[in-house]
Image (cartoon, rainbow, N blue to C red):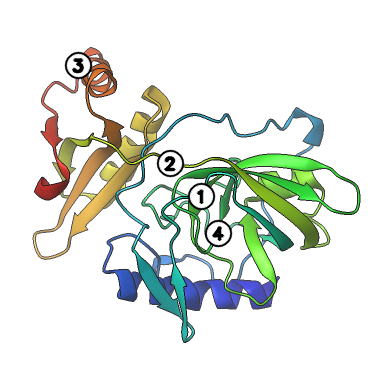
């Protein structure tokens, strides 16, 4: 598991440099811990639920056409419906908890998420252990694992549900059950804050209020952290988010198209 952590750190840093996407990955200075470690245990694994599959647009971050890690080039799939793959699943833990995933969301070890090298973000996949046919449905919102033979990196909760949190890896098959759709979409900028911790606190609050991804884009020169919801399908979905913001005393959102980001 420690080797996986080392490869993951190097790989995500390289992905950040290659794709020129803010918050795509974290360098060493962004982590509070030098080594990965196990979260507080989940006492009742039977209470764990699969990720709820829903239609989502393609994330604005984390989906470059191609990127290079450790000298190997990866091409992100544009059409992934029905994609299947076999190999080994691993998982990643508390070192990355609270930090940005490749599409700008915040990694939470207790959510049903995962990382994959080439699937469009976000995708929903069913991962099945080959030895006992136990399965879990996860939402892929990150890149990795960049380790030979491993095809998917699970969150801690997904690893517990699949029963591989102690062994670290397991042979699996995986199948995409929902891929993101590219279509007319908007980004809703809620605010821009000078304090990064305040921006992160608002990000977490917004994520509980509505269903779409919430990301932070930072401008280091101006010390601004823009809190944005999106991408959101244009039309009724956008109107619904704006109404939710108004109802929660956030009355002045800025609606942006892709070229305005």
Q: Quick one: SS at disc 4?
A: loop
Q: Name the front one of labels 2 and 3.
A: 2
Which quarter of the rendering shows the N terminus?
A: bottom right
Q: Name the front one of labels 4 and 3.
A: 4
As drawn, 119 above or below 53: below
Q: Name the front one of labels 2 and 1.
A: 1
- Between 97 and 82, the residue placed more toward the observer is 82
Q: Quick one: SS at disc 3?
A: helix
Identify the residue under disc 2. Answer: 180
Cα–Cα gap, marks 1 and 4: 12 Å
As drawn, 252 above or below 222: above
Measuring from the top left, give residue 8's x and y in whole percent.
Answer: 54, 71
- Between 29 and 109, the residue placed more toward the observer is 109
Q: Crowding near pointer 2: few (<14 within 10 Å), some, many (20+)?
A: many
Q: Earlier in the sequence, mark 2 or mark 1?
A: 1
Q: Earlier in the sequence, mark 1 or mark 4?
A: 1
Q: Earlier in the sequence, mark 2 or mark 3?
A: 2
Q: Crowding near pointer 1: few (<14 within 10 Å), some, many (20+)?
A: some
Q: Is residue 40 visible?
A: no
Identify the residue under disc 3. Answer: 246
Q: Earlier in the sequence, mark 4 or mark 3?
A: 4
Q: Quick one: SS at disc 1?
A: loop
**Label at residue 80:** 1
As drawn, 158 above or below 251: below
Identify the residue under disc 4. Answer: 116
Q: Is residue 184 visible?
A: yes
- Between 68 and 190, the residue placed more toward the observer is 68
Question: Which residue is pictured at 14% across the width and 29% down the height?
Answer: 253
- Between 89 and 183, the residue placed more toward the observer is 183
């Amino acid at each position: 598991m420690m080797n996986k952590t080392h490869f993951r750190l190097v790989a995500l840093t390289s992905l950040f440099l290659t794709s020129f996407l803010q918050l795509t990955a974290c360098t060493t200075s962004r982590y509070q811990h030098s080594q990965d470690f196990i979260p507080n245990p989940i006492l009742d694994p039977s209470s764990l639920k699969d990720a709820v599959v829903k239609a989502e647009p393609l994330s604005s971050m984390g989906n470059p056409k191609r990127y290079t890690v450790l000298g190997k080039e990866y091409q992100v799939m544009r059409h992934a419906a029905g994609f299947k793959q076999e190999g080994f699943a691993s998982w990643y833990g508390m070192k990355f908890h609270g930090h940005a995933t490749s599409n700008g969301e915040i990694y939470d070890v207790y959510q049903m998420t995962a990382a994959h090298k080439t699937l469009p973000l976000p995708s929903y996949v069913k991962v099945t252990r080959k030895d006992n046919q136990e399965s879990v449905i996860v939402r892929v919102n990150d890149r990795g694992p960049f380790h030979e033979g491993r095809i998917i990196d699970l969150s801690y909760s997904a690893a517990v549900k699949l029963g591989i949190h102690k062994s670290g890896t397991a042979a699996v098959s995986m199948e995409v059950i929902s891929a993101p759709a590219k279509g007319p979409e908007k980004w809703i900028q809620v605010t821009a804050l000078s304090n990064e911790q305040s921006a992160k606190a608002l990000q977490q609050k917004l994520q509980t209020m509505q269903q779409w991804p919430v990301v932070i884009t930072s401008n280091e020169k101006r010390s601004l952290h823009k809190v944005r919801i999106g991408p959101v399908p244009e039309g009724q979905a956008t109107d619904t988010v704006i109404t939710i913001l108004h109802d929660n005393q956030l009355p002045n959102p800025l609606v942006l198209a892709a070229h305005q980001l």
